[in-house]
Amino acid sequence: MAIDNLTTPVQKPRWSELKEEDDRSDYDFLLPPKQVNGPDEHGLKKVIEYKFNDEG
């Protein structure tokens, strides 16, 4: 069927095309999503979150 033709691939921006800015919050969409695992049998929950540091 023609269903494959209806979906368009999502194009991610290339690193070379991104402008260097002091505010890195605009690029948060490039990071993996937040992961929450648990709670386990001991009641512990593990949260994995990625952020840009001051150096990028």
Image (cartoon, rainbow, N blue to C red):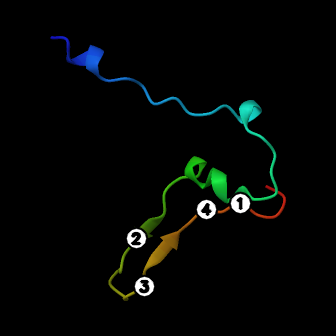
Q: Secondary structure at mark 2?
A: strand
Task: Judge from the rendering whether residue 6 lies leftward or rightward of residue 54; answer left or right.
Answer: left
C-alpha span from label 4 to label 2: 15 Å
Identified by mark 1, the residue type is Phe
Q: Secondary structure at mark 1?
A: loop
Quarter occupied by residue 5: top left
Q: Secondary structure at mark 4?
A: loop
Quarter occupied by residue 14: top right
Mark identifier at residue 52 = 1
Badge 2: few (under 14), some or many (20 or more) residues near its Cα, within 10 Å? few
Mark closer to the observer (2, 1): 1
Q: Quadrant of the N terminus?
A: top left
Residue at (56, 66) in percent of width and height = 49
Task: Judge from the rendering whether residue 40 lies leftward or rightward of residue 25; answer left or right.
Answer: left
Mark identifier at residue 50 = 4
Identified by mark 3, the residue type is Leu
Mark 2 in CB contact with mark 1 (< 8 angstroms): no
C-alpha span from label 1 to label 4: 7 Å
Q: Does 1 appear above or below 7?
A: above
Label 2 or label 3, whichever comes before in sequence order: 2
Label 4 or label 3, whichever comes before in sequence order: 3
Mark identifier at residue 44 = 3
Label 1 or label 3, whichever comes before in sequence order: 3
C-alpha span from label 4 to label 3: 20 Å
Identified by mark 2, the residue type is Asn
C-alpha span from label 1 to label 3: 26 Å
